[in-house]
Every structure is written in C-alpha cells, then in structure tokens.
Image (spheres, rainbow, N blue to C red):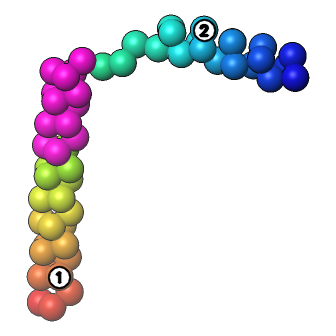
Amino acid sequence: MEKVKEYYKQAKVELDKVIFPTKDQTKTAYISVVVVVVVIALFLALVDLIMSALITA
C-alpha cells in the first residue's frame, strides 16, 4: 500500500511540472495544422490530376 501512495505522490509532483499551452498558443498551433493539411491536400490533388492526365493521354 505504501508503494501506491508513493506512486501517486510522485505522479502529482510530476504533474505540477507540466506547463499547459495558453489559449493563443493552442489557436496558433491549430491554424498552422489546418494550413499545412490544406497545402498538402492541394499538392496531392495536383499530383493526382497530372498522373491521371498522363495515364489517359
């Protein structure tokens, strides 16, 4: 039982060290991810269009 108490005590100490992102940091990261996903999707659509045009030609 002592090991369990010690485990939770150490877990709490470690969780106190965690720095959670602010609202602005989260928003910036979200926007960055959306932009990257859109750019990659457009690139893949362009590659697909070119490849299908080459195959059907």
Q: Amino acid at mark 2?
A: Val
The 10 Å Cα crowd at callout 2, few under 14, some 14 to 19, many 20 or more, is: few
Residue at the image position 60 percent from the left and 14 percent from the top? 12
Region of the chain picked out in magenta, as a range: 22-35
The overriding secondary structure of the stretch rendered in magenta is helix
Look at discs 1 and 2 and give the one toward the viewer.
2
Q: Which mark is residue 52?
A: 1
Which residue lies under the disc numbered 2?
13
Would residue 29 be visible to someone looking at this image? yes
- Name the secondary structure under disc 2: helix
Q: CA distance from mark 1 to mark 2?
A: 57 Å
Q: Amino acid at mark 1?
A: Ser
Foreground residue among 54 and 29: 29
Would residue 43 be visible to someone looking at this image? no
Image location of residue 50, percent across then percent down: 13, 73
Would you place residue 54 above or below residue 7 in this image? below
Foreground residue among 43 and 35: 35
